Image (cartoon, rainbow, N blue to C red):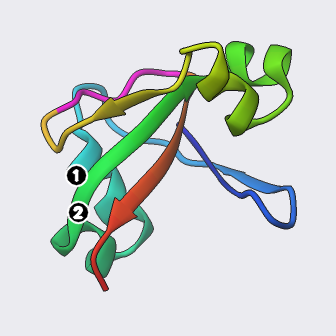
Amino acid sequence: FFTGDFKSSESRAWQLPQGWTARQAAGRIHSDIERGFVRAQVVQIGDLLACGSFAAAREKALLRTEGKDYVVRDGDVIHFMHTA
């Protein structure tokens, strides 16, 4: 899966074992994100590249909101929402 800093256009690819959930994926980044997990905003990389931005993907209804039990798929771009 991929993550990104949408202000600086920086992105990062992460590897996970197959079958991991969004909450587990959040923990791969930082344990605080896993503990405070609220939801994940998810779009497939191909859709995001075609749209050019998360905002455009949202406008075209390609951005989904998923919960902690969502099974992460190859090619997901995820923005984790979490408490501090």
SS label for mark 2: strand
Q: Position of residue 58 (x, y in %)?
A: 60, 27
- Location of residue 41 by image quarter: top left
Rendered position, 83 above or below 9 = below
Chain part drawn in magenta? 70-74
Residue type beneath disc 1: Arg
Mark seen at residue 23: 1
Q: Position of residue 23 (x, y in %)?
A: 22, 51
Q: CA distance from mark 1 to mark 2?
A: 6 Å
Dot 2 crowding, Cα within 10 Å, few <14, some 14–19, many 20+: many
SS label for mark 1: helix
Q: Position of residue 79 (x, y in %)?
A: 50, 50
Residue under label 2? 37
Q: Residue at x 72, y 14 (%)?
A: 46
Rendered position, 6 above or below 68 = below
Asked if the residues shown at circle 1 and circle 2 are in contact, with their CB atoms under 8 angstroms apart, the answer is yes
Q: Give yes or no for residue 5 being in the magenta stretch.
A: no
